[in-house]
Image (cartoon, grey):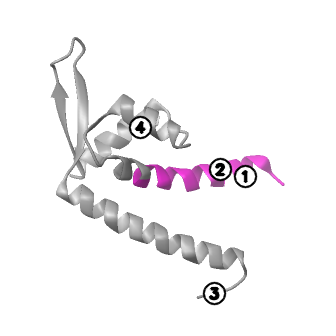
Amino acid sequence: MDSELIATHVAELRRGTVVLACLCLMGEPRYGYALLSTLEDAGFEVDANTLYPLLRRLERKGLLTSEWNTDEARPRKFYVLTDDGHAARDALAREWTDLDVRVRAALEGSTR
């Protein structure tokens, strides 16, 4: 088995799940670094060079808004889900559940 080929496909699978995971974990305002830590604690291998561009993309698409908190010595940008972000999260979660059912059925050799 070509381990590089498998690694490529695993990376593709994970790439899509990171968006859903981020949206799911944004139930409350989060700083980028706190979200990164939460993702890592949940078993998602995401580095800052992946997360921060993703957050900016989600913000450009209107799924997140951001604000700077300057109350502390070091200003921090925190992100909040918009109404569209909540709707996207819910739609993606439903799709994930449906995909999970179909993949499990395929793994078991059956169809719906």
* Mark closer to the chain start, 4 or 1: 1
Q: Give x and y (percent) for residue 75.
A: 22, 19
Question: Which residues, given as a range, are shown in magenta?
Answer: 1-20
Q: Secondary structure at mark 3?
A: loop
Q: Which residue corresponds to the image point at 39% horizontal and 47% vertical from the top-left?
A: 22
Q: Nearer the viewer, mark 2 or mark 3?
A: 3
The span from disc 1 to disc 3 (Cα, nearest Å) is: 27 Å
The span from disc 4 to disc 1 (Cα, nearest Å) is: 24 Å
Which residue is identified by label 1?
A: 5
| Tag 2 and tag 1, C-beta contact below 8 Å | yes
What kind of residue is marked 1? Leu
Q: Give the quadrant of residue 59.
A: top left
Which residue is identified by label 2?
A: 8
Q: Secondary structure at mark 2?
A: helix
Q: Is residue 1 above or below residue 35?
A: below
Characterize the local packing of mark 3: few (<14), some (14-19) or many (20 or more) Cα atoms within 10 angstroms. few
What kind of residue is marked 2? Thr
Image quadrant containing the C terminus: bottom right
What kind of residue is marked 4? Leu
Give the label on residue 51, or none: 4
Image quadrant containing the N terminus: bottom right
* Mark closer to the chain start, 3 or 4: 4
Q: Does the segment drawn in magenta span residue 17?
A: yes
Q: Give x and y (percent) for residue 7.
A: 69, 48
81 left or right of 100 in image? left
Q: Does the segment drawn in magenta span residue 38?
A: no
The span from disc 2 to disc 1 (Cα, nearest Å) is: 5 Å
Dominant secondary structure of the magenta stretch?
Answer: helix
Q: Give the quadrant of residue 106.
A: bottom right
Q: Which residue corresponds to the image point at 48% horizontal and 55% vertical from the top-left?
A: 16
Q: Nearer the viewer, mark 1 or mark 3?
A: 3
